[in-house]
Each structure stands twice: as C-alpha cells, then as structure tokens.
Amino acid sequence: DTGVSQDPRHKITKRGQNVTFRCDPISEHNRLYWYRQTLGQGPEFLTYFQNEAQLEKSRLLSDRFSAERPKGSFSTLEIQRTEQGDSAMYLCASTWGLVVGDTQYFGPGTRLTVL
Amino acid sequence: ILNVEQSPQSLHVQEGDSTNFTCSFPSSNFYALHWYRWETAKSPEALFVMTLNGDEKKKGRISATLNTKEGYSYLYIKGSQPEDSATYLCAFIFTGNQFYFGTGTSLTVIP
C-alpha cells in the first residue's frame, strides 16, 4: 500500500471557478477526513466520512463546499464559486476508525491558489 | 471551536541541543492527544497517540508526556539533529471523531 494520495497536488484557479480535489485513502481504512490549513495555522477540520456516510461537517464548510465518498473508498471535495479566501492547503487523512481517536494517516495535500 | 495552543511558535537550536515544546488543551472531556511531525513537502506523520494521564511515550530521541488534569503535553527531543527540522503539531480529540490541531511549533536545527 502506498499510503494516502491526493490529486492534484497544486491547483491555481480564478475566482468564481469550481474546483474538485480527490483523495484516495489507504485501502481498508473506513474513516476519511478533510482538513484545510492556512498559513500559520494548524489543520482545521472540515468533514469526515465513516465508509460512505458523511457523519460530521464543520461550520467552516459553507454551502459552496461539498464532499462525497460514493463507494466508501475515494473521496472528492468540491468548492464552487471559489473565493480568494479559499486559498489554502487541503489535506485528507484516513484511519481504520475501529478505535476512536486512531492515528490518522495524511496525504500530501492539495495546495489551492485562487487568483 | 476548542482552543489548542502550542508554544513556542518557532524554535532554532544548534545540532546536539535538547529541546522541548508544549501543547495546551482543554482539560475537560479529554479523549486522546496525538503528536505529528510535518516536514516540508511531505505529509504529516504520526509520532505518538496518548490517552492516559501520566502517559509517557518514546520513539528514539523523541519522547512525550501527558497531563490530562492540567491540560498539557510536552514533546522532548534529545540531541537534536538537522533531520529533526520540521513543524510539530499536536491534535486534541475530545469526542473521538474530531481532531483539533494546534498551530504547530516550527523547529529548525542548525548544523
């Protein structure tokens, strides 16, 4: 297993455009998390999935953000009508989820720049 | 939103020096505390998962302690090496589902 992968690694877009990121977790990991990290801050929780079910969403996740994990494997995070404030590193992490508070395994992140 | 604080924000040490950082978190409803190391251009890597008051964990030259009653954890690095240069993040878990990260301590070890 090669670990958690994210695609793309970098994305530059113009304000108002839609973007979609993909995360492939470690296989057999049933829990998948999305975080956003801005300069000088730690990762901020956005949402998480237990298999295909989205169980929790942060207040940070406005209506322009949507996440899916259709078959309980990979996940996508879409941002519609991007704003400059959306510029950040978007991190994905997965865990077995069998024990609450299990170690998270992170992907390399997708760095979004909104011009 | 819970407040998880880390200090110092950044640190420069000479190779061979020992150093330590602090992670402060709410002392109520504690479930677990994680430490991660995040090197530039890499993914955050888990160092320790700590759950019990008084826990002490060690991995090579790096160790961590936990005090859940007063709400803090210390990370120690003995004999710092240039390869230890990274940002060290702590994450507080109180429901078991959400991870609240601190802002990190950026360590630079000068050869």
Image (tube, grey):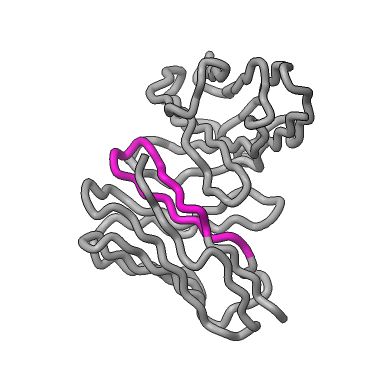
Indicate the position of residue B74 as horizontal and vertical percent values.
39, 69
Q: Is residue A52 left or right of residue A86?
A: left
Magenta range: B86-104
Residue positioned 47% across, 36% down in the render: A45
Residue A95 or residue B25, whichever sits in front: B25
Which quadrant, please, contains the C terminus of chain A?
Answer: top right
Residue A46 in the figure: left or right of residue B44 = left
Work out which quarter of the rendered image holds the N terminus of chain A and state it: top right
Q: Is residue B99 magenta?
A: yes
Residue at image location 66% in from the left, 70% down from the top: B83
The residue that appears at 44% across and 25% down in the rendered structure is A49
Q: Quadrant of residue B37?
A: bottom right
Give the left or right position of residue B6, taking residue A106 as reference: left
x and y percent of residue A50 in the render? 41, 25
Please say if B10 is above or below A89.
below
Residue B17 lies in magenta, yes or no?
A: no
